[in-house]
Amino acid sequence: MPSICRFYGIVIYIYYREHQPSHFHAVYGEHEALISIDTLAILSGNLPPRALGLVMEWADIHKDELKKVWRQAMACRQLDKIEPLK
């Protein structure tokens, strides 16, 4: 699985040749959520409130980079890593 970032026990993935809309997967323990890159809305799944807040803060900071990595994934190119939340 192509992870693009890890922070505070949260792993962020973008899969190759995924379905629209553009989104990423955030995994924290046994929890997983699919989150829209454009709107930061939860498309499916769930995360504990604290983990979700961290993911949303990170995604807001790195929205342009997420869009770039999404395009890389759709073109089956190597995915850039994105800096973790500090």
Image (cartoon, rainbow, N blue to C red):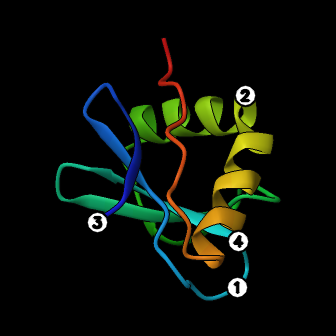
Residue, disc 3: 1
The residue positioned farthest toward the front in the image shown: 77
Q: Report the side of 86 relative to 7 (left or right).
A: right
Residue, disc 4: 22
Q: Are marks 1 and 4 in contact (CB under 8 Å)?
A: yes
What's the CA distance linking mark 4 and mark 3?
17 Å
Residue 86 badge? none
Q: Amino acid at mark 4?
A: Ser
Q: Quadrant of residue 82?
A: top right
x and y percentages locating residue 54 in the rendered image: 50, 30
- Residue under the image location 65 percent in, 39 percent down: 59
x and y percentages locating residue 23 in the rendered image: 63, 67
Q: Secondary structure under badge 1?
A: loop
Residue, disc 2: 61
Q: Amino acid at mark 3?
A: Met
What's the CA distance linking mark 2 and mark 1?
22 Å
Residue, disc 1: 20
Q: Residues within 10 Å of mark 4 (few under 14, many from 20)?
A: some
Question: Which is more N-terminal, label 4 or label 2?
Answer: 4
- Residue under the image location 18 percent in, 49 percent down: 29
Q: Residues within 10 Å of mark 3 (few under 14, many from 20)?
A: few
Tag in front: 4 or 3:
3
Q: Are marks 2 and 4 in contact (CB under 8 Å)?
A: no
Q: Are marks 4 and 3 in contact (CB under 8 Å)?
A: no
- Residue under the image location 50 percent in, 59 percent down: 78
Tag in front: 3 or 1:
3
